[in-house]
Amino acid sequence: MELREITIERREGTGKQVAKRLRRRGLIPAVLYGRRASASVAVNPTDILKVTHGHGGSTQLLTLRFAEDGETRTAIIRDLQIDPVTDGLLHVDLQEVAMDQAITVTVAVHPVGEPAGVKEQSGILAMILREVQVSCLPGQIPERIDADVSALRIGDVLTVAMLTPPPGVRILNDPNQAVATVAPPMAEEVPAAAPVAPTEPEVVTERKPKPEEETK
């Protein structure tokens, strides 16, 4: 896997005032969780967003280079804090890794092929599980796990046990957990009949005789 390099700075202090000063410089606070100790750092949010675009956060392996002395660390992104109003990046958690030690990361599941139940039976493919937990060496982290759904017919279920991870990658999810299925086509909706306005009952009144008729 290609390592993406990001420049980081060591950071002193915490709190809103520190975060405001960093934002004025185009940076945001972050924490690098190391194998021995954690470090408060600052990063450029644009660099982080470029790395995560098109990738699951923890699937991208990074080289972190300290701006002060050029020291490097290998890490992955563990968590991103997003502003719910502006969608701007507020904070990043980074996890240092050792290239010779297995780690657990989340990897996206990607459907491959057109299910027979969709092509021949007009069914609908339903992805039940869109990511899995895997264990592997940092250099073997896959960008995704492919799920071959081409043989699925209506009612069939593809489980975790049927996925084929790359060599050196072990899926940690329950093997019986459902990944995808093909559901029957949705029944066409029958338009509801227009409501019929209730009719007023006809009132029959007895005709009063005319005066000349009463005298006859």
Image (tube, rainbow, N blue to C red):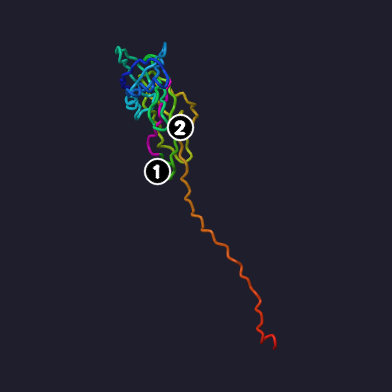
Which mark's residue is nearer the viewer, 2 or 1? 2
Quarter residue 151 falls in: top left
Residue for badge 1: 119
Left-right relation of 89 to 191: left
Secondary structure beneath label 2: loop
The residue positioned farthest toward the bottom in the image shown: 216
Q: In the figure, residue 133 lies in which quadrant? A: top left
Q: List x then y, in percent, for residue 88.
A: 38, 29
At 43% across and 45% down in the image, what residue appears?
122
Q: Which residue is mark 2?
A: 129
Amino acid of disc 2: Leu
> Residue 67 is drawn in which quadrant?
top left
Left or right: 10 in relation to 206: left
Residues drawn in magenta: 104-114
State the residue in front, 40 or 196: 40
Work out whether residue 93 or residue 186 is closer to the camera in this orientation and state it: 93
Percent x, y for residue 190?
49, 53
Q: Residue 23 at x, y = what percent?
A: 35, 24
Residue type beneath disc 1: Lys
Q: Is residue 125 left or right of residue 54?
A: right
